[in-house]
Amino acid sequence: MEKGRRLLFWAGILFVFAATSIVFLEARGLDAQANANATPRVDGVIIDTLASYGKLELPVVTFYHDQHTDALAKQGKDCASCHKKDADGKLSTMFMRLEDGDAAELKLIYHNQCIGCHQEMSGAGQKTGPLDGQCRSCHVDRSADTAWQPIAMDLSLHARHVVATGGDEKCGTCHHRYDEAQKKTVEVKGKEESCRNCHQEEPFRDETGLLISSFAQSAHSACVACHQDFAAQKKDTGPISCAGCHSTEAQAKYKVLSEIPRLKRGQPNAALLVTMDGEKPKVSMGPVAFNHEKHESTVGDCRSCHVGEGTMDGKFFELAGDMHLRSNMQGCIGCHDAKQQEKAVCAGCHDMMAVNKAPSQTSCVKCHDDSLKDLYADGAIPAKETAAARAAEAVAARDLTVATIADEEIPEIVIIGSLSNTYEPSKLPHRKIVKRLIKDMQGDTMAGHFHGQDVLMCQGCHHNSPASKTPPKCASCHSAPFDPATPGKPGLMAAYHGQCMSCHTAMQLEKPSNTGCGDADGCHKVK
């Protein structure tokens, strides 16, 4: 009996020791993995495939792709070591399979293949990853610790790919449509669309049951495979590693074309934009003559305006939402506001303007042209050629010169001294400021279009008074101290400082500084 107790005691000790050793080894493996990847990386691929089958037993796996491809390359191996080829000879983005099976099958694929490779390398005396039993070394969710950056096929990058793949006649290298009769993807000339029009964020089956891969799967399969083919032919090519596309450092080194050839898509040089009420045009205001060619050169890609599926047909704004909504970046005003904030010379005035202020009728007629309403009389819809021709005429007739004011009509110095106490009155170099703003806007077509009225410049500072060369003094509105009941109308001192200092900040002016009140280059001199 005593002997049996001793055996049970030592068996318990051995069990505790073994369990502690396993936990210790897993912890060591986890620590090693964490320390090895302490710096944010761009190549972390989250393996959470089994999550669609039910609740996961362990955290998702963060798989560092570049780390593994580098290790395989040293052994003379390539992507085919982990990815199978489909019927067209293209590598699948899935790991060691062409399609998903059941949960048990997927679990075996990952465990047998990953751990099996590690054991093979360990047996050969090579440095490798976690082995059997070190579950927590792989099952660590580090998805938040990433420096991964999305990449866009902007117009410059697209133009470079057009040249690399053989010119405008080779669009089918990347663009295709699925032909149900032939059961394969084919090129359809003149019908090229954005990849995202078919490939969505997640894979799905269409109405015919065809499995459509996600955009990420499609892009990686097509782009990486093409780059690999070019590399094998000793041609200049794009990146193959994750970091080559998705790191900030790599993207900063991409060549940007100074002159980008126009993307040929059958689009007009100019078009008329009009709101549709069902099948009939709604022209309470005149149509907008839209300079399509000019806008192409100012956006990153077609998707900047054309959103949703199948929107390259001239009706994109029906899906884009309210074109006047400032928060809608596919809309006119939202995009224009963003451009104003990007340019320091514009931001100085526009940063202080009330964003919720309703546009005036003067603003509306800058875009809406009543002389074009006859095309839509009695609900008629003009032919595309006719609309494009009239739009082109209206665009060509525009004067895009920034209106100026004669020097003698601009006060040279404005003395601001109504509040002078500790400091001498401030001498504002008024004419110098106005002339500098006008000079910096010259050549900007958007500024020229909207600044066709000479006194419009004055509205940047004299914001709530009628446009005039002799606007009222600030004190006419801001004389009273701050009243909580009217938070939008500060007292005179706050109005002066808020207007001037905010403008200097928005325009990124270093002198005079916002905090150097009595400095040599400041606005005030101490009494």
Image (cartoon, helix red, strand yellow):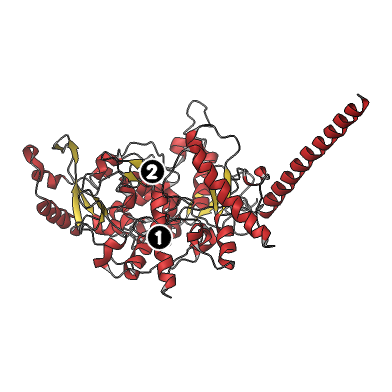
Residue labelled with disc 2: 203
Q: In percent of the image, x 25 and y 46: which residue is there?
A: 311
Question: Is 6 left or right of 206, judged from the image as shown?
Answer: right
Horizontally, is 461 left or right of 455 in the view? right
Tell me the SS state at disc 2: loop
Image-quadrant location for residue 174: bottom left
- Mark with earlier residue (1, 2): 2
Residue 423 higher or lower than 408, as above or below: above
Question: Dot 1, how many residues are within 10 Å of its Cα: few (below 14), some (14-19), or many (20+)?
Answer: some
Helix, strand or loop at label 1? It is helix
Residue 257's spot in the image, x, y percent? 38, 68
Residue 340 in view, yes or no: no
Name the spot of residue 175 as percent of width and height, x first. Answer: 29, 57
Three-letter amino acid code at disc 1? Cys
Point 49% across, 38% down: residue: 103
Q: Judge left or right: residue 477 versus residue 267.
A: right
Instruction: State whether residue 436 is above or below residue 323.
Output: below
Residue in front for this viewpoint, 330 or 450: 330
- Using the rendered view, name the quadrant where residue 165 is placed: bottom left
Is the N terminus in the top left, top right, bottom left or bottom right quadrant? top right
C-alpha span from label 1 to label 2: 18 Å
Circle 1 residue: 223
Q: Which of the pair 333/267 is nearer the observer?
A: 267
How crowded is the residue under tag 2: few (<14 C-alpha within 10 Å), some, or many (20+)? some
Amino acid tagged 2: Pro
